[in-house]
C-alpha cells in the first residue's frame, strides 16, 4: 500500500494505492481478504455536518467471504450536509448502478435512492445456499427527524425478475412503506394481490425496546420447544398485523415452488390485552 497525506489549516488530500493488501493479516477473524484498489480524497474541515469533501475509489478486486468482486467504482461527496454517492459495479455476480442523494444534520436525515441492478446472484456470492438471482430497478426515500422521533420511508422495486430455487417470478413492482412517530407505527408491504400490514400504537423506539425484551423469551421457547403465551404477552406491545394473499404474487410463487399451493390465504394477528 502506498499513500500520501497532506494536511493544513485549509484542507487535506490523500491518495492511496492498495495492491493485494491482505486485510486478514490485520483482522484475521473478518470476511475481507485481499484488496486491490486506488482511493483519492480531498476536503476541507472535519465536522461531518460542515465539511466539504470528495472521495473516489476504484476497486480492481476485493475478496469477501471467499468470493472475488471486481470492477467496482464508488464516488461520494459531502458539502455542508448535502451528500451524494454513486456505486457502479460491473462484476459478473453483481452488475448495478446505484445513486444516493440527500442531506444530513445533527438531528435530521433525508435520503433518496435510485438505481438499476442488472444482475445479482446470491448463490455465487455465498449469501444463499439455493438459487436466488435476478434483476430490478430501485427507487426509494427516507426521512428521519430524531428531534421528534418521526421516521418515514418508501421503497419500490420495479421491473422485478427473480430466479427462485424452484421457479421464476416477474412483477411490475414490490412496494414497502414505513412510518412512525411517538404515538404510532405502521408498515405496509404489497405485491399484486398480496398485502402485509402492521400497526402499533407505539413508536419505533418502544417497539425496539420490546423486541430486546422478547428475544430471550423466544430463545427459551425454542429450547423448550413450546410456546409460552404468558411470556410473549408480557413483552410484546399492542399491535395488529394482517397478511392476505391470492395466487399472483412473490409469496405464492415461492411457496408453490416449495410444494405448498393455495388459492387464497389470510392471517390475522392482534395483541391487545391478550394475544389473539
Image (cartoon, grey):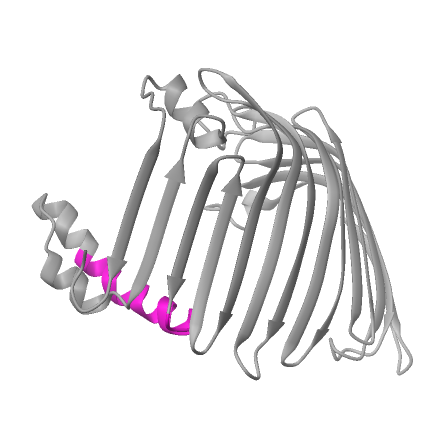
Residue at horizontal 62 percent and vertical 50 percent from the top: 155
Whether residue 40 can be seen here: yes
Placement of 25 over or under 199, stated as above or below: above
Count the marks: 0
- What segment carries the magenta color? 201-217
Q: Quadrant of residue 159?
A: top right
Q: Nearer the viewer, residue 234 or 43?
A: 234
Residue at horizontal 55 percent and vertical 49 percent from the top: 176
Q: Is residue 168 left or right of residue 199?
A: right
Q: Quadrant of residue 185?
A: bottom left
Q: Is residue 226 left or right of residue 49?
A: left
Question: Residue farthest to the right?
Answer: 10
Q: Nearer the viewer, residue 260 or 268?
A: 268
x then y, percent, for residue 194: 46, 38
Residue at horizontal 37 percent and vertical 44 percent from the top: 243
Q: Nearer the viewer, residue 87 or 159?
A: 159
Placement of 276 over or under 51, stated as above or below: above
Amino acid at each position: 500500500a502506498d499513500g500520501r497525506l497532506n494536511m493544513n489549516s485549509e484542507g487535506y488530500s490523500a491518495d492511496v494505492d492498495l495492491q493485494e493488501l491482505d486485510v486478514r493479516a490485520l483482522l484475521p477473524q473478518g470476511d475481507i481478504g485481499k484488496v486491490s484498489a486506488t482511493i483519492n480524497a480531498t476536503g476541507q474541515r472535519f465536522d461531518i455536518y460542515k465539511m466539504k469533501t470528495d472521495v473516489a475509489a476504484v476497486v480492481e478486486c476485493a475478496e469477501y467471504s471467499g468470493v472475488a468482486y471486481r470492477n467496482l467504482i464508488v464516488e461520494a461527496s459531502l458539502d455542508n450536509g448535502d451528500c451524494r454517492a454513486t456505486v457502479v459495479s460491473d462484476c459478473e455476480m453483481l452488475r448495478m448502478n446505484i445513486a444516493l442523494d440527500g442531506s444530513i444534520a445533527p438531528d435530521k436525515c433525508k435520503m433518496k435512492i435510485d438505481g438499476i441492478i442488472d444482475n445479482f446472484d446470491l448463490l455465487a456470492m455465498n449469501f444463499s445456499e439455493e438459487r436466488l438471482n435476478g434483476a430490478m430497478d430501485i427507487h426509494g426515500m427516507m426521512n428521519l427527524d430524531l428531534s421528534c422521533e418521526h421516521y418515514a420511508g418508501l421503497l419500490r422495486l420495479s421491473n422485478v425478475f427473480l430466479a427462485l430455487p424452484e421457479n421464476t417470478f416477474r412483477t411490475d413492482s414490490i412496494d414497502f412503506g414505513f412510518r412512525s412517530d411517538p404515538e404510532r407505527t405502521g408498515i405496509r408491504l404489497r405485491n399484486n394481490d398480496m398485502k402485509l400490514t402492521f400497526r402499533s400504537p407505539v413508536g419505533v423506539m418502544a417497539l425496539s425496546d420490546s423486541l430486546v425484551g422478547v428475544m430471550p423469551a423466544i430463545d427459551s421457547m425454542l429450547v423448550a420447544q413450546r410456546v409460552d403465551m404468558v411470556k410473549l404477552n408480557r413483552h410484546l406491545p399492542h399491535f395488529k398485523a394482517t397478511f392476505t394473499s391470492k395466487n399472483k404474487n412473490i409469496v405464492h410463487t415461492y411457496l408453490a415452488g416449495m410444494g405448498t399451493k393455495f388459492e387464497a390465504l389470510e392471517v390475522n394477528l392482534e395483541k391487545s390485552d391478550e394475544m389473539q
